[in-house]
Image (tube, rainbow, N blue to C red):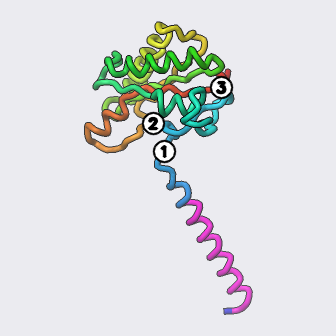
Amino acid sequence: MNTSGARYMTYLTRAVILTSILALSACTNPDRFGSDDVVLNGGGTGAGAAGSVSDPTSPLYFQQAVGDRVLFAVDQSSLSPEARVVLDGQAGWLQTNSDYTAIIEGHADEQGTREYNLALGARRANAVQEYLISRGVPGGRLRVVSYGKERPIEICSEEACYAKNRRAVTIISSGLSG
């Protein structure tokens, strides 16, 4: 092989290696949609959970100590007693930390149509919003969004996975955009 052919093979090899590295690095995040460790900043982009779990005024404390999610029964948007306890904690935190706002995400499991699950996710997010408002959180600090079945945290065809996906998640934000 001549020198130019060897040089071409070197470049080709480097390109293949670089492409492989990029492809593999795209697969390393087990939290596919950032629901567990992302706090939205005012612009609506993922910024990572801010603060420390030991700082009771931080979004990370809210997420891990107060609890950022509640679960729902199959095809339901009514709040369980366990969900109300979590939401009471969320309401207290939001009242104490009035410089934050929240985006409430409604989710559903993969069963049912896309349209039905978007509507169900909206009902779940609205139920959380209404409960937080009833506990004294100003409605202007809360925004709801439904993802339906589009952002599962567990993917399998078992009830244990479905149950984790039937949820509403309260994401702490430094301000609402738009």
**Distance between the alpha carbons at the discs numbered 2 and 3:** 23 Å
- Residue lying furthest front in this view? 54
Answer few, some or many: residues within 10 Å of disc 2's Cα (few below 14, many 20 plus, some between 14 and 19). Answer: some
Q: Quadrant of the N terminus?
A: bottom right
Q: Residue at x 55, y 23 (%)?
A: 103
Element assignment for label 2: loop
Task: Report the side of 51 relative to 107 (left or right).
Answer: right
Q: Quadrant of the C terminus?
A: top right
Q: Nearer the viewer, mark 3 or mark 1?
A: 3
Q: Nearer the viewer, residue 122 or 129?
A: 129
Q: Is residue 21 visible?
A: yes
Give the amino acid at mark 2: Arg
- Quick check: is 4 in the magenta stretch? yes
Question: Which comes sooner in the sequence, label 1 or label 2?
Answer: 1
Give the amino acid at mark 3: Ser
User: Which residue in the structure is indicated by mark 2?
Assistant: 151
What percent of the width, then of the height, locates residue 11? 68, 76
What percent of the width, then of the height, locates residue 87? 43, 19
What percent of the width, then of the height, locates residue 67? 45, 28
Q: Main secondary structure of the magenta part?
A: helix
Question: Which comes sooner in the sequence, label 3 or label 1?
Answer: 1
Mark seen at residue 174: 3
User: Which residue in the structure is indicated by mark 1?
Assistant: 32
| Residues under numbered marks 3 and 1 in contact, where contact means CB atoms less than 8 Å apart | no
